[in-house]
């Protein structure tokens, strides 16, 4: 059993390197009073029974580069969808926001033999596939039968990630394939995608036979392509709606980019190596998937606040897409932090509506929130709060609202 909560308040210790430049130009004493008040109130509010006894917290002042408050910040915790912060950072740093996913139609030496090749586009839609079929049909003799083979070889045959429970697939997260449609949470996502493509060709008058699942031949010729969706598009929706399938595809794409196998082991290594290159030590972390669905995943509050610091003040241009409109949820307004979900609507938290951008996280026993808060004193403060072993006597919403109350304190609400 974890020890009883004995909050540790720190008001002036320098945090991780990505924010060191801020401390060089700003006098920490200018914000000392507010930092002290925040620390004092948070220490008291950590006793809220809706949080339980397994809660970690870290708050840092991004303007001064100092730690405001921490409680067990280096204790590895199950992060739930806060893992998507890791995935977003790695995708943007490795692939870049403008990287375009390519779903292609190729023709073999026999022009009647076509290959629908998945490029791991997590944003692929029914309309995308239908448009691809229309482009494929251009200039073709409708009287000549077509065989459509399927190349989904970019990713290996799907398996469950370590820590995925049987009840999670495919309803919470689908098997990871390189040819699948957005929001398809089913066991056979590739077949469904191919069916859309074939059905559209058939509607255009072609006689179409579903061929084999084989890689396209090296000498195949490109005849049509969808390359309209980018990493930025995927990161936006993944963060806003906490979309698991997008996260798992991006997790594999980082492995592909780094020349590693696009399986769970390769993606894990790619994620760890990417973090090291960014100056983040993954030694205390467990990165078993990209979505946070795995019950084996572990992050620390200190690492999450370090990443928020990196993406907001350390290298903001590189990671701007994480905080673009319709990306990281805004308290009480957008995405998984909408007021309609009960977020930032209580007496203790509604004053913080619109002042926080943060990633939510939920499993049945885990509630998390990590991001950045704008305060009344003009400073921005990064925070990470993770509750594991959520008290079963309280609802998930009750614990979420207790965390909302903590973050409201960081904005300067009383």
Image (cartoon, rainbow, N blue to C red):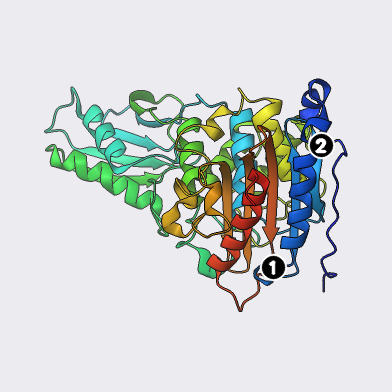
**Front in this rendered view, residue 222 or 271:** 271
Estimate how packed mark 1 is, as few (under 14), some (14 to 19) or many (20 or more) residues with alpha carbons within 10 Å.
few
Asked if residue 331 is positioned above or below residue 80 in the image, the reply reads above
Outermost residue to the right: 13
Left or right: residue 110 versus residue 170 is left
Q: Position of residue 367 (x, y in %)?
A: 62, 61
Label 2 environment density (alpha carbons within 10 Å; few <14, some 14–19, many ≥20): many
Q: Is residue 17 rendered to the left or right of residue 129?
A: right
Left or right of 315, for residue 26 = right
* 217 vs 245: above or below: above
- For the residue labelled by badge 1, is the local secondary structure a helix, a strand or a loop? loop
- Residue shown at 65%/52% (left/top)? 414
- Would residue 257 appear left or right of 298 to someone viewing this image? left
Based on the displayed image, in which of its 4 quarters is residue 412 positioned? top right
Looking at this view, is 6 or 310 the one in front?
6
The residue indicated by pointer 2 is 66
Tell me what residue is drawn at x 25 percent, y 29 percent: 136
Query: Label 1 belongs to which residue?
Result: 48
* Quadrant housing the N terminus: bottom right
Residue placed furthest toward the bottom? 393
Q: Residue at x 78, y 56 (%)?
A: 76
Q: Does 100 sit above or below residue 286?
A: above
Classify mark 2: helix, strand or loop: strand
Q: Residue at x 59, y 38 (%)?
A: 88
Q: Nearer the viewer, residue 411 or 4?
A: 411
- Give how far across and how far down residue 37 sits, in percent: 76, 48
- Residue 67's image quarter? top right
Quote the CA–CA distance across marks 2 and 1. 26 Å
Q: Of the numbered discs in the image, which one, if any, rests on residue 370?
A: none
Visible residue check, residue 157: no
């Amino acid at each position: 059993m974890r020890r009883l909560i004995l909050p540790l308040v720190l008001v002036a210790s320098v945090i991780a390197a990505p924010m060191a430049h801020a401390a060089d130009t700003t006098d920490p004493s200018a914000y000392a009073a507010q930092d002290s008040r925040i620390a004092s109130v948070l220490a008291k509010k950590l006793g809220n029974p809706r949080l339980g006894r397994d809660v970690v917290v870290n708050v840092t002042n991004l303007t001064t580069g100092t730690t405001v408050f921490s409680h067990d910040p280096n204790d590895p915790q199950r992060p739930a969808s806060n893992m998507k912060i890791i995935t977003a950072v790695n995708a943007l740093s490795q692939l870049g926001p403008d990287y375009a996913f390519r779903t292609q139609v190729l023709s073999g030496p026999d022009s009647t033999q076509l290959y629908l090749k998945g490029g791991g586009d997590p944003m692929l839609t029914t309309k995308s596939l239908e448009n691809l079929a229309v482009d494929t049909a251009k200039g073709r003799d409708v009287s000549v039968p077509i065989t459509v083979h399927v190349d989904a070889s970019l990713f290996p045959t799907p398996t469950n990630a370590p820590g995925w429970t049987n009840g999670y697939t495919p309803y919470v997260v689908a098997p990871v394939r390189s040819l699948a449609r957005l929001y398809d949470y089913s066991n056979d996502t590739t077949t469904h995608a191919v069916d859309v493509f074939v059905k559209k060709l058939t509607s255009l008058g072609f006689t179409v036979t579903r061929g084999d699942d084989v890689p396209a031949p090296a000498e195949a010729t490109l005849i049509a392509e969808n390359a309209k969706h980018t990493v930025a598009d995927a990161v936006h929706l993944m963060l806003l709606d906490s979309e698991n399938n997008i996260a798992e595809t991006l997790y594999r794409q980082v492995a592909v980019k780094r020349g590693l196998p696009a399986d769970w082991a390769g993606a894990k290594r790619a994620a760890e190596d990417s973090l090291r290159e960014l100056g983040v030590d993954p030694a205390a972390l467990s990165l078993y998937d990209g979505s946070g669905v795995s019950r084996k995943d572990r992050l620390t509050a200190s690492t999450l606040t370090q990443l928020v610091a990196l993406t907001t003040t350390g290298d903001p241009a590189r990671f701007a897409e994480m905080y673009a409109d319709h990306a990281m949820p805004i308290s009480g307004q957008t995405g998984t932090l909408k007021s309609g979900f009960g977020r930032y609507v209580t007496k203790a938290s509604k004053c913080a509506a619109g002042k926080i951008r943060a990633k939510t996280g939920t499993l049945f026993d885990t509630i998390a929130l990590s991001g950045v808060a704008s305060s009344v004193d003009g400073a921005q403060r990064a925070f990470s709060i993770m509750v594991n072993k959520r008290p079963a006597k309280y609802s998930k919403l009750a614990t979420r609202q207790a965390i909302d109350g903590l973050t409201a304190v960081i904005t300067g609400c009383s």
